[in-house]
Every structure is written in structure tokens, then in C-alpha cells.
Image (cartoon, helix red, strand yellow):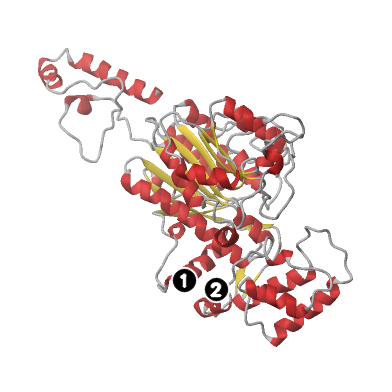
Amino acid sequence: MLRKSIVTLLVIAIFMLCACAPVALQAAQSDPTPSPSQSIVVNTATPTASPIETTAPAQQEPYPKYIFIFIGDGMGVNQKTISQSFLQYISGDDTATLQLNSMNVNASVSTYSANADITDSAASATALATGVKTNNAMISVTPDETELRTLLEAVQDIGYATGIVTTTRITHATPACFYAHNTHRSNESEIALELLNSDIDFIAGGGLKFFLPLTLPEPYASFAPDVRNFEIVSTRTDERNLVDEFADKGYEIYLGPDGSTQLMAYSPAAGDKVFAPLTYNYFPYEIDRLNRFGALPSLSDLTQKAIDLLSLDDDGFFLMVEGGRIDYAGHNNDVMSIIYDTLAFDDAVQTAIAFYLAHPEDTLIITTSDHETGGLTLDADIDYLTLFDGVYDISASYGDGYGMLYEPRIGISEYVDALNAMGIINLTDGERSKLRRALRADEEIEYKDDYIDTLTSLAVNAIINARLGVSWSTDYHTGVNVDLGVTGIFEERFADAVDNTDIANILADILDVDIGP
């Protein structure tokens, strides 16, 4: 690495200077000269009597060898608060705390974009990846379309292995901002090509549909249905088979449920690369993955597998992990899905903390969010540990679970039975009355087959929110600040961060790399 070469030259120069003084020469000869492959790290808190250290004009500081950036998409303070309460409920420990709430250094950062007080994921992730504000929907380019150098690209140039892990599509806005440059987040076919050329070592998440040719060859034409039983079709704009092209570049390929099992059994070797679009579109919500799609790995599983591969690189690694479906649940005002996905995201952070404890002098872990989604409000004077009794058995999400139950002219009894099977139990007379009115109203509406926001499903969601004493201000993003948590080497440098751009710029300064314009 460049850093190692510079330090080695510095040591050699000092050694030659010391040769002019007999006493210094004698001391220098008693201390072996480090080889060019070694990195010199001086602990200034406990200086030694070495003449090389005491006469050097500058000290070489340590640097983060292992860097994690965790982004909880749509995760605000209240999303963490209610998830921690649920953790206390299911553990029986009223002192249980999320790892997200236990980082060593904490700050609150603003998230506005260049053209709006309320950001989208593209503009916010661009800030987190490049340290520069841009307009909503733009992917690591400035408002005038100038490409911005990202942290991931910068660390690749100094030798780091790199990884991207997400529970949404790997071409989606947040992960894309770390490797792609595009004027609009919707151009995912183009973004997929940039991922192909990114040379990222470990890539795992959803979004297979953007890597398949328009005319599907076997085995893709018979690929297992996605989490909402969508037909498997390509959404590329050409006939390129990017899965095959990744394979041609030497990547290990893992697809779908079978690929998930194979990936979890895989033992990486030094120099390996992995491409794993494990679902056709996005990952299921964690509550659905646990209850219906257990073959798919958890976010923590994928994080560990990324660590297993990336840590084989002697130069270190940079890993971005996104809990991408917290945001989707916020758009749906689905509190139970938010809780489960936040806990799954927290488990992934704990996986990184375990690695940090084994490498405390070399590891830096950053946790944050791109924005808050939904305007989640927790009502005052509520004992959540009691209220969870009414929702604990829920085993399905709104969007991919009970939101799909509506069928015209279904009776209230049949609908209640279906809800009971999903853990929405002990409906009161008032709740049944709300459902009955919604079912009758839905009979007059013609919905698309995959439409989830029926009046009946909205009524069910309202019942659950009322049971938990939560409310929402919107089904979109809000402009509130989000939390930043940091643990590891150089953690104190982040204490004064006040905006999301500060995170990337502080890290770039620590690493002495150039990002941005």
C-alpha cells in the first residue's frame, strides 16, 4: 500500500540521518530495520526511548484497517425506541439495549438534500458516500451531473477489499451511491452495468431481475417465484446476461433459495469474489423471512459471510451494509415489520461488533440512517411491554402478508380466520365492525391483482397501530435528524458531526483519501 511505502522511506531516511552521530548509530543498530512489507505504527501515548521515534519530525498514526458503514434505510429515533422496547418484551429483560443505542460515540445529523428539506435515499446516500449534497434521485453526481468520487472507490485505490450487502436490490439507491454515478436512481439497468465493472469483492442482496436478459434462458425462466409471487421476468433494457458476465469475471455466483444455502456453506479463499442476487426483487421483510422464507439468510448471516471473505485481504476492507426494508415498512406504516427489520439490522451490527472485539486497534464501525420514513410517533404514557401482548403473535407483514388477503365478497368470518392464522388474534367487536365496513366498501372497488392498499388491509393496519399506541404523520420521508453511532479506532473524530456529509468527509480525512468532486 502507498501508506506502507511512505512510512518505510521515512524510516530509512531517519536511519541514514542518525548515522552521522555515533551514539545514535549505536542505538539504531540495536533495533532491527523493518522490512518494506511492514507498517510502522507509533503509539504516542506510551513513547519508547528509540532514537528513531524521538528524532522523527512526524509520527505515523494508525488507521482503520477494517471499516463498516451500516445504513438503516428509513430508521429514525422512534423506530429504534419501539424496537428496543420489543426486545425487552421478548427477552424479559427491561434493561436490554440495542447495539445501535450502545455505540461509543453518538451524534445527531441532518439529512436535507441539495434541492429539498426532505431527502430521498439517493441524495442522502450520495452524501454518506461522497461527502457532497446533491438533488433528490441523483446517484453520486452533483446537480450539474459531475461525477463524484465515492469512499468505496477511494479505498479500492489504496488496496482495500470492498463489499456491499443489502436487503433490497443491490442496484437500489442506497447501495448504488457507493459504486455508481447516474442522473436518476430509476436507471437500474445502467446501474447494474456499473456494478459489473465496480470490482467489488462481495456483493449480496436482491434484484436479480436487473441482471437477466430480456429473453430468459433456463434456468431463469423457471426460477422460484419472488416473495410476492411475481412472475420472474427481466427488467433490463437489453439482452445482456450480466449473471454470466459476472461469472466470466471470476465471481462465485449464488442465486435464489438454492444459492442461499450454497452461499452459507461456502468457505471463501483468498482472492475470491462473490456475486449473490439471492431474490428476484427485494428481500422479504424479516418477519416474513422468519416465518415463510427461512432458506434466505439473515442480514447478520450475509454480514458474517462478507467478513469471512473480505478479512482474507491483508490490506483490510470496507463493507457497506444496508437494512433496506425498514424504509419500505415505514412507507406502509407497518410497525411490526419495522420492529423485526430493525432488530435484524441490529443483529448485523452486533456481528461487526464481535469482529471489532477481536480487532479493536484496527476496526471502525459507523451506524446511521439515510432519513426517517413515516413520521412514527409513540403515544405518551404508554406501557409498551403490556401492549405488545396484543401483537406478539403477528407473523406476517402488511405489504407481503395480510395486505394480500383481500378477495372480493369474502366474508368477515373467513377474513378473521385468515388473520388469526397470521397471529392477528382476539379481535374485539369494535375491530370486527371496522373490518366488516371495509370489506363491504372494497366490494365496490376494482383492484389490481397485486394491489395491497385495499380498504380492508388498511383497516387491519390501523387496528395494529391502535393496539400499540402508535401513529404516523405520513407515508413518505420526513426531514428530522437521524442518529449517528460510532465505535472503534478514531471514533472520537465523529463526535462533532452535524450533517450527513460530515460522516464521509471525516472518514476520508482519517484515511487521507480524496472523495467528492
Instruction: Give the residue at mark 1.
Output: 90
Q: Residue 197, how many percent across, how many down?
A: 60, 27
**Element class at badge 1:** helix
Of residues 345 and 454, the one nearer the viewer is 454
* Residue at image coords 41%, 67%: 96
Mark earlier in primary sequence (1, 2): 1
Label 2, on which residue?
Answer: 392
Say whether residue 30 is visible.
yes
Q: Quadrant of residue 388?
A: bottom right
Residue 152 at what x, y percent from top left? 52, 34
Name the residue: 61% across, 41% down.
170
For image coordinates 85% across by 74% down, the residue present is: 441
Q: Is residue 116 left or right of residue 97?
A: right
Residue 420 in the image, given as x and y percentages of width and height: 64, 76
Q: Measuring 67% from the left and 68% from the top, which residue is drawn there? A: 472
Q: Of helix, strand and loop, which one carries label 2?
A: loop
Mark 1 and mark 2 residues within 8 Å of each other at the beta carbon: yes
Q: Amino acid at mark 1?
A: Ile
Q: Report the Cα–Cα distance between label 1 and label 2.
A: 9 Å
> Measured from the top left, where is residue 386 in percent x and y?
51, 80
Bin the neighbour count of mark 2 within 10 Å (Cα to Cα): few under 14, some 14-19, many 20 and up. Answer: some
